[in-house]
Image (spheres, grey):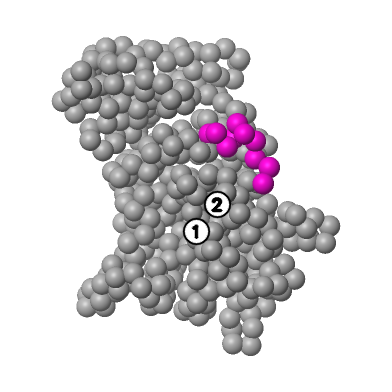
Amino acid sequence: MNIWFMTSLVILSLYGTFSLDNGLARTPPMGWMAWERFRCNIDCVNDPDNCIGEKLFMQIADHMSTDGFKDVGYEYVAIDDCWMSHQRDSNGKLYGNTTRFPSGIKRLADYVHSKGLKLGIYEDYGKLTCAGYPGSLDHLEVDAQTFADWGVDYLKFDGCYSNPKVMDTGYPQMTKALNKTGIPIVFSCSWPDYQRASGMKPNYTLIGDNCNLWRNFNDIQDSWDSVTSIIDYYAKEHDTLAAAQGPGKWNDPDMVIIGDFGLSYDQSKSQMAMWSIFASPLMMSNDLRSVSDEAKEILLNKEIIAVNQDALGVMGRQVYKTGAMEVWTKPLVNKSFATVFLNRNTNGMPRSISMTLKDMGYNTGVDHYTLRDVYLHKSLGNYGINDQFTATVNPTGVVMVTASISTT
């Protein structure tokens, strides 16, 4: 059992509080989640290869293990809604749909673990899940223990069919239930999203004490418009969101849709760059059995993943915006930085932008930096803090650079 987790439980019991301190998600979680790509497809008769069932999740685990995803940090294989039976058993416990998950969730967890990966699962704080399956309200402790007994490693806890006004007490009750199991489980909350949508102001201090990550804006859809709406929200709410997150607790702008149908190659590069600048969870939702080589190259880019997984855990800031051109900079360890130049124009013509490193936010008293293009995997040379750097950016695309202290 995790010693850090058990020590935390002792401390929490002494002080009578139940904040989540499970030692997990010290950097943004990485993995794969079913919802955006596969939704609630339960038709295993007519569509056996794409329905929400154990076959799909085992195949995804196989590809994560063999196609390089596990090697660069993707570790969670997460089930979303529609996995369970419409009724609880005679003991009030959840169980997987017996047609689509004939071996049971425990067996699926064992299979995922055998691949060196971890299993995620979905439930809802309300009476029902968003798709109408049994929710956890009035069953928090039994559900938490059930997930622990199955070997679940990650819980996405939605908020349909519940009252946002009681979530400030309700979600911490699930935190308490998860702590009580003695098993460390990453806790992903939808709490602030439902409160925002109802006109409430989320208490991010409380949320950060009880969740490892949290949704705070609309569900992502398979479109560039959806991606940019999330970027706009994160720009508008930057100060609040940046203050809320750090190691062990993360803002979640929702799934990575690279490899699906709605994004071009440049737009796919843009989402990966921006989610990394945000220090966001990288939870893919795509079909890893058929994802293109172009998409795979983006998703497996170790240099961009390193920016996302940087130990500081700082959310990047928009340092410049004029028209459709934006510049975002994120501090990294060792006084390094990452910067994304984003061109949201759609008129077919690349645009150039020139800025000094100082204006890009590199204000740490360091005089010279070595810049590197992380998509081209190419050194761009040394620049003084007052030197101009020029990026030429494709429409709806990005140029992403990292900057480390120059040694010459």
**Position in image of residue 103 (x %, y %):** 67, 73
**x, y percent for residue 256:** 54, 43
SS for dot 2: helix
Q: Residue at x 60, y 31 (%)?
A: 294
Circle 2/circle 1 CB separation < 8 Å: yes
**Dot 2 amino acid type:** Ser
Amino acid type shown at disc 1:
Gly
The residue that appears at 26% across and 72% down in the rendered structure is 7
Location of mark 2 (residue):
65
Quadrant of res 399: top left
The spot of residue 131 in percent (x, y) is 66, 62
- Disc 1 crowd rating (10 Å Cα; few below 14, some 14-19, many 20+) is few
Whether residue 83 sits left or right of residue 7 in the image: it is right
Tag on residue 99? none
Please name the residue that numbered disc 1 is placed on. Answer: 116
Mark 2 crowdedness (10 Å alpha carbons): few <14, some 14-19, many ≥20: some
Residue range of the region highlighted in magenta in the rendering: 289-298
Residue 14, image x and y in percent?
Answer: 22, 78
Magenta segment, prevailing SS (helix, strand or loop):
helix
Q: What residue do we see at 31% from left, 64% from top? A: 21
Residue at point 53% right, 38% down? 299
Determine if residue 156 is in view.
no
| Separation of marks 2 and 1 at Cα, in angstroms | 7 Å
Q: Is residue 353 magenta?
A: no
